[in-house]
Amino acid sequence: MRIKRLAPIAGLVFTLAMVLGSTVPATAALSDCGQSGKFCGWLDSGYGTKIYTLSGNAGVTKYLDSNDRDKTSSVRNRTNNYWCGVNQHIGADETVAEFQPGAQISYVGDFANDKIDHYDIKANSGNCYNPTF
């Protein structure tokens, strides 16, 4: 009888351990972005599975590796520049987001999610298309 009562509790404890053990806290993921001067992107919202770390100066375009394009869901901007997330199209590119210096965005929004192919780095705000983060 005792074993039957403990079985559901043991199952619940096992399930919680699996869920909690596989989740990386956002603060740990954010610290994974490294030192200042870096711009990082994650595959999942909430900073899950980092896919790139970039650096660059204003006036530069940073292209993502082909296997990292159209996957960004969250970002951290540890630079002093504005990073314009651009979706490449045949004929014309579309800027889908502007990330301000110091931005920590756990979800880039439906308009930019899984669409960024490269970044145009700017010194000033307003040189990217909105939405601004």
Image (cartoon, rainbow, N blue to C red):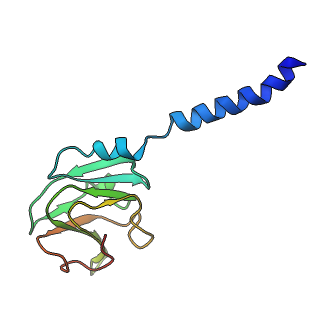
Estimate the x, y position of residue 95 in percent, counting from the top left.
Answer: 28, 76
Please identify the quarter of the rendering in which residue 79 is found: bottom left
Q: Which of the two residues, 120 or 38, is positioned nearer the viewer here?
A: 38
In this rendering, position of residue 11 left or right of residue 62: right
The quadrant in which the C terminus is found is: bottom left
The quadrant in which the N terminus is found is: top right
Estimate the x, y position of residue 90 in percent, counting from the top left.
Answer: 30, 77
Q: Which of the two residues, 91 or 51, is positioned nearer the viewer here?
A: 51
Above or below, comparing residue 4 to residue 94 in the picture: above
* Residue 72 in view here: no
Marker count (numbered): 0
Estimate the x, y position of residue 123 in percent, counting from the top left.
Answer: 11, 71
Please identify the quarter of the rendering in which residue 115 is found: bottom left
Residue, x 36% and y 52% (percent of image)? 42
Q: Which of the two residues, 42 or 91, is positioned nearer the viewer here?
A: 42
Estimate the x, y position of residue 63 in percent, counting from the top left.
Answer: 21, 60
* Residue 86 in view here: yes
